Amino acid sequence: TRPKVYNFGAGPSALPLSVLEKVQREFLNYENTGMSVMEISHRSKTFENLLNKTKHDFKTLLQVPDNYEILFMQGGGCTQFSAVIYNLLAAKRQQIPEEEEFNPPLDYFVTGSWSAKAADEAKRLYNNVNIVIDVKKSKGSFGSIPPKEEWKLSGSKAAFVYYCDNETINGVEFPFIPDIDPSVPLVCDMSSNILSRKFDVSKFGVIYAGAQKNIGPAGVTVVIVRNDLLTNPKSVNDKDNGVTVIPTMLSYKVFVDNNSLYNTPPMFSIYVSGLVFEWSLQLGGVEAIEEINKEKSKKIYDLIDKSKIYRSFVDKPVRSRMNAPFRIVPEELEKEFLAGAEELRMVQLKGHRSVGGIRISMYNSVTSEAIDFLINYMIEFEKKHA
Ligand code: PMP
């Protein structure tokens, strides 16, 4: 047992209690092996079964088509900022005759801090990065997604189009899948909203998500990649562009060919993620979870919109169902709000240091009960300060 808290952290964040309890029960003796999951060989049948079941459940949850592969990689979401560049430039290289110059643009939507970081990494590694939109530059701050007329896409020339589906820090979530040239692979960072709602995997070339929000413990990153984009890690050699061969541990094909067992994977993270997938299926899958998430976030935003002291800085149509950042007017009240929340055991509500204020993260394992408890507190806090 542990003292009850309501955990609204942005990541690492709350895990379902029933999952943690199962981990505890199985901790010393996994499937009667007399060993903890952390003590068995990653090459054992026991672990291979666990890995394959985890992959299977994830595929079921997102209805991943058969022409996609699921990989369990390391290095978090940030490592994927680099990995997609190497892998998809290599895939594009295969379509261009050897003798032709090879310098395709990489198209980036910049709608918040994480896509900005991804675009910065692209600029470090490669010399032809095209910014489709940079909302902070064009509007002064993040909090909206401008209409298609303002997007500057490169069309079929691009090696890929990149976006972040849910900006964890800024609370901006795409309510649609960007409509792009269908011949260009669409790459998406879904670290903070994967498994929170249904979507059509077949629209994407690559999807990735660091585990530590809706999936499980930090340490594993789940990557979904369309199999026509897999290339030999040695297939690019355009030194002029700065990108040469794909480092082995970033190569999607190496992970596919080895069933994510090229080297020792983060076994414990994969194990707990598997339990979270089982829990998600028991809840009724992503469709059922989506309904609960809609309700939870609607309650929060309705309260903010009615309030005289809470202020959202995100346009209504693009407000995230996972992360609701907001400010309190006057801002001096924010400290008191957080302290009062802590006293009632509502924790990890502080906004990211780059935007300040408060942030309510309401991932899949944050219960409606937790949201109701918080709403009650917010109403009482406002009454006291009206
Ligand atoms: N992308 C998004 C949307 C994130 O929220 C985060 C982390 N919170 C990252 C990428 C970076 O992930 P990691 O810390 O696993 O590298």
Image (cartoon, rainbow, N blue to C red):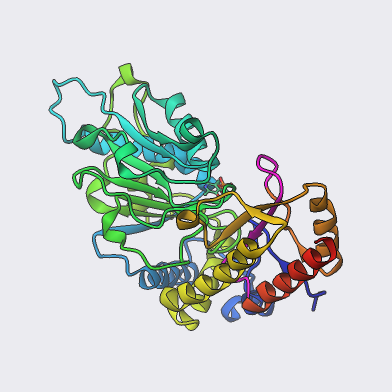
In the image, farthest residue toward the top: 240
Q: Nearer the viewer, residue 305 or 350?
A: 305
Q: Residue 360 magenta-drawn?
A: yes
Boundaries of the magenta span: 352-367
Residue at image position (33%, 35%) is 107
- x%, y% of residue 216? 57, 63
Viewport quadrant of the N terminus: bottom right
Q: Nearer the viewer, residue 319 or 42?
A: 319
Left or right, residue 375 beside residue 153: right
Does residue 364 appear in the picture of this structure? no
Q: Nearer the viewer, residue 264 or 328?
A: 328
Residue 311 in the image: above or below residue 158 = below
- x%, y% of residue 323? 58, 57
- x%, y% of residue 324? 60, 57
Residue at image position (40%, 44%) is 163
Q: Quadrant of residue 25?
A: bottom right
Residue at image position (25%, 45%) is 180
- x%, y% of residue 385? 83, 60
Q: Residue 204 magenta-drawn?
A: no
